[in-house]
Image (cartoon, coloured by chain):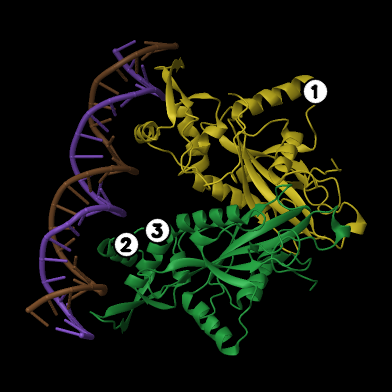
Chain colours: A yellow, B green, C brown, D purple
Amino acid sequence: MTRTAIGTADTRDAEHSDVTRVAVSTVIFTLRREPGDDCPSLVMPLVRRTRDPHMGLWALPGGWLDISEGLEDAASRTLAETTGLTPSYLEQLYAFGAVDRSPSRVVSIVYWALLRADEVDAQAGGYAAAGTEPENVRWVTVDRLGHLAFDHNEIVDYALWRLRNKVGYSRIAHGLLADTFTLAELREVYEAILGRRLDPANFRRQAENSGSLIPTDDFRTGSHRPARLYRYNQDVELADRGPLDIRPRHESSTS
Amino acid sequence: MTRTAIGTADTRDAEHSDVTRVAVSTVIFTLRREPGDDCPSLVMPLVRRTRDPHMGLWALPGGWLDISEGLEDAASRTLAETTGLTPSYLEQLYAFGAVDRSPSRVVSIVYWALLRADEVDAQAGGYAAAGTEPENVRWVTVDRLGHLAFDHNEIVDYALWRLRNKVGYSRIAHGLLADTFTLAELREVYEAILGRRLDPANFRRQAENSGSLIPTDDFRTGSHRPARLYRYNQDVELADRGPLDIRPRHESSTS
DNA sequence: CCAAAAGTGTTATCCCTACACCCATGG
DNA sequence: CCATGGGTGTAGGGATAACACTTTTGG
């Protein structure tokens, strides 16, 4: 492994200013329920830049592509370095390569990923207990990002567009939930992503008819009528992406 | 401009074997109507490799990314070098970066493009008249490609999947036609891409209701009842891709 | 007149939406 | 018993698919 940098695309060495280098960054989504809020909201981790192109600004997690490392491996690695977690979903977003997007020539292969809310909470709790909470990492609601380094605002906008688009025809919403969940929880994920409320009755039917949900015998008991817990049917993959193995495997760590 | 190579991802210099280089390749689709056939079929240009990784095999047109050149510019450039034409549609497909996809480490940013059938025919006629038909370029029907260099078979499969997928929810089919066309011609494009016949009556209604077609006052007179010619409404862009300027501009050369 | 493609009309079906309604639980 | 969310039923609208039908040309 060669050296890598958190915070994409800085100038590693002056001597490299005449070559094109490849960076890999990742837009990482998860869901956070604020105590006062009625519905959860999308949040993502950002990394503070400690070097000069845009030093001090917040940027997407990322690093240089190692010569002996696959693109997706690089995305997973930087994701783990930033969050300590394994994504429930990881997909390539786009390759950004405008000549002027960085002082030196950098092509960024950008991935986007989903993290299960419960895993993030557990991890955050662990950091808090150990007192090792990283100072240069911050989790931010997607609609309050502010001005990011490089072209990262554009990148996040595109990732958000893709997420919202994809939630309509695939089952990525499961990537934000624990392995069992109520239909209301699943619906809240959709509502948080799409930014609008959905009819519970119709949502239930659609979800049930999709064939991707397995009802369990357990119920979530709240302050009212208990709700059945469902599980994601891993067999059904749904026409989701390409016909080949280009697409990432979901390395679900909970199952 | 530095040196470039037709036929992606060969080893430029031995001294570069310790760096990751960026190549840009393009899957170029157009429609060819064989004299005997009843319906046109998808064809694409391939380039014969003249250097050693996979020398002699056919490969996608491509070349090394120049340090002062945008990704899309590189795709357009190699496309022009191969076909002498400007694409009617050009979009990034995927970044391929498996460690073992080439002897040296190469990340290929792959684009896919559409060419208007009439422009390709005109160009081919020009080559034939001038006697300058390139020997190392061959136009092949997509279902008779044979074994290509590198992972290019996978790449073409993915591009085909994307094309077939996209034809269902966008109007890229126009990218394969001249600027005026009959509904039957438009339907044939869809049929060639999707590989199945479509009901002419229903297709007509869908096309008319899409709002993207402008009827002209001209008719195509064949051996039977004349058919109205339509034009593509360039104002309507349809929710097609990302919300920002990441998407390529269609540099249509006919309008 | 005939064949064949251009173009129109009609109907059944499916899916989605809205919304009324019943069910089960904690307080 | 009542408020609240869990869960079911149902009627209307829009899009699609299947296919019968009329129109217009060349031969």
Type of residue at label 3?
Gly
Q: Nearer the viewer, residue B184 or A57?
A: B184
Q: Is residue B167 above or below residue A116?
A: below
* Image mark for residue A131: 1
Q: Is residue B127 above or below residue B188?
A: below
- Same-subunit check for callouts 2 and 3: yes
Determine the secondary structure under disc 1: loop
Q: Are marks 2 and 3 in contact (CB under 8 Å)?
A: no
Query: Which of the chains bears the disc numbered 3?
Result: B
* Image mark for residue B195: 3
In this rendering, does residue B255 appear at all? no
Q: Nearer the viewer, residue B185 or B151?
A: B151
Type of residue at label 1?
Gly
Q: In which quadrant of the rendered view does residue B81 lie?
A: bottom right
Q: Nearer the viewer, residue A238 or B11?
A: B11
Q: Residue at position x 39%, y 17% from top?
A: A225
- Counting from the top left corner in percent of width and height, residue A155 is at 65, 52
Q: Nearer the viewer, mark 1 or mark 3?
A: 3
Determine the secondary structure under disc 3: loop
Determine the secondary structure under disc 2: helix
Q: Quadrant of the N terminus of chain B?
A: bottom right
Query: How far apart are labels 2 and 1 at the CA level?
Result: 61 Å
Q: In which quadrant of the rendered view does residue A96 lie?
A: bottom right
Horizontal relation, residue B94 to residue B189: left or right: right
Q: Residue at position x 41%, y 17% from top?
A: A224
Query: How far apart are labels 2 and 3 at the CA level?
Result: 18 Å
- Counting from the top left corner in percent of width and height, residue B178 is at 44, 77
Crowdedness of circle 1 by 10 Å Cα count: few (<14), some, many (20+)? few
* Image mark for residue B206: 2
